[in-house]
Image (tube, coloured by chain):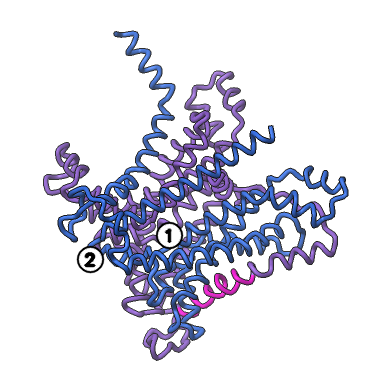
Chain colours: A blue, B purple
Amino acid sequence: MNSSWQRFSRWLKAHLVLIGGLLVIVYMFIPISVVVLMSFNKPDSKLVYKFDAFTLQNWLHPCADPSMCHAVRRSIEIGLLATIVATVLGTLMAFALVRHRFEGRGAANLIIFMPMASPEIVMGSSLLALFVASGFGGQLGFGTILIAHIMFCLSFVVVTVRARLAGLDNNLEQAAMDLYATEAQTFRRITFPLVFPGILGAALLSFSLSFDDFIITNLNAGNTTTFPMYVWGVAQRGVPMQVNVIGTLMFIISIVIVVGAEINRRRQEKALA
Amino acid sequence: MTAAVVAETTGASPHPEPQEHSPKRKLTGYWLLLPGGLWLIVFFVLPLYSLVATSLYDPDGSVLQGYDMTWAFSNYWHALQDYWSPLVRSLVYGAVATFICLVLGYLLAYAIAFKSGRWKNLMLVLVIAPFFTSFLVRTLSWKLLLRDDGFIVNTLQFLHIVGADGRLLATPVAVIAGLVYNFLPFMVLPLFASIDKIDHRLIEASSDLYSRPAVGFFKVTWPLSLPGVVSGTLLTFIPAVGDYINAQLLGSPKQRMIGNVIQDLFTKANDYPAAGALSVILMLLILVMVLFYVRRAGTEDLL
């Protein structure tokens, strides 16, 4: 008895940090499990947000409130467009910063870093101030949201792609050049494929940042409603359970993408070895 | 893959100097930088200028009639006088949430880096997974978890930690808990990036030289992880101070943060000069704190 207790306490001592870390992860997942659970909820009243009875209705009729699906579509459209533009512009900037020497690197780095170090409320209100001052105050909507989203995604793309590019093994490109590949060939066959996972990661990050943004969007949206703005609106007057269906779907899709990418990476690693 | 990318991103990443520099390539660099750079100048830098201008408009104007530029520095004085308490509250909530995030995040990042073995990538994925599920929907879940007749409140009442009619919603505890929850991944990832790079042999060396584990931690691991601590605390503190979603959904008017005030001034009261002044004050406060902090921590190569 005594020795097994000792063994247990020794085991506990050895794994204390890991157990603590796992508890933190459990804490991070508690609200997500609530989201999944509530997506199967049949509420008694619209005003009390708690689990009442099991139903599949929310999943079978996700668009029971058409304005929600409309908002989701808006968010996807904005997210895709913002991701494409930000990923292209940001990748070009990352190449410039890692591969080219020029005057004013410090200024360029500062301008890229600053949006990540500014509170969203400040970025949102300054954009609004600009739009109003330049006479676009009446045209807030899809376009202004898109402009804002590209702006705050850009910095994240640059740092993500830059990190990948900086970690690249130069010898591979050198070898291609030694084997008489032209600069363009080297780029197409060696550099780009090696950087691509970084670009893909940056695009994924951009999309989720854009899809999820509320504070900046809300200030510059005019009458356009994105999904987070829809949730904000219904939070005051009763939340339809379909909101949790969307939350659950987002979670599942992102897990599938991330796990898929990881499996793909392992397979490639194995193929190389 | 994404996990690693995000971890790399948020840590202090290295900046190797480019090797080649012929005049032609030098120009190419500018061309590559131009479109994105212009975007940031027009839609990030210029708006900041516009914000400062707005904060100095004549407060008697209105959005519809337009504002006159009267260099009304008094806007700042009035804004501080009217809203100093939400401002201070935001800084306090942000600091407390950041500290709790640091403790929880360090534990988690350390466990992933040193104790997770072959599950390292899986645990990293688990850390960023919540990040991909809508921020607002997750915060609404906390509202449900912390509700007045919910399991958590009932347990706390049973244990007499809160009074019989005590509650969690509409208290600073709920708002800070929400902030901690929402910004924890921003703390974990840079911490992980830093801790993961630490050479294990250094820690072994310290224990070979008879230092106790705790001493080894504070003399070896902690100093080597400082870059992660600095960027993690900044990435947590800055969004936490400016956030108003948690204060709105989990708090009450008594927990109003500066973000709520700025948002309402812009969208409800239409008082642009006051809102602009508050935004500028918030930005300056954060800028000063960041510079001071980065200098104190001695890691100036954050950029």
Q: Which residues are magenta?
A: B38-54
Asked if residue A134 is positioned above or below residue A70 in the image, the reply reads below
Residue designated by label 2 = A237
In the picture of the structure, the residue carrying the numbered disc 1 is A212
Mark 1 crowd level (few <14, some 14–19, many ≥20, 10 Å Cα)? many
Question: Left of A142 or right of it: where is A65?
Answer: left
Q: Is residue B221 left or right of residue B126?
A: right
Residue A69 is a magenta residue: no
Q: Main secondary structure of the magenta part?
A: helix
Q: Position of residue A78 (x, y in %)?
A: 48, 67
Residue located 50% across and 42% down the image: A259
User: What is the number of callouts on the image?
Assistant: 2
Q: In the rendered structure, the residue with mark 2 lies on which chain?
A: A
Q: Amino acid at mark 1?
A: Asp
Q: Position of residue A98 (x, y in %)?
A: 71, 54
Q: Quadrant of the N terminus of chain A?
A: top left
Q: Are marks 2 and 1 on the same chain?
A: yes
**Residue A1: numbered disc:** none
Residue B4 percent across, percent down from the top left:
56, 43
* Quarter of the picture holding the C terminus of chain A: top right
Q: Secondary structure at mark 1?
A: helix
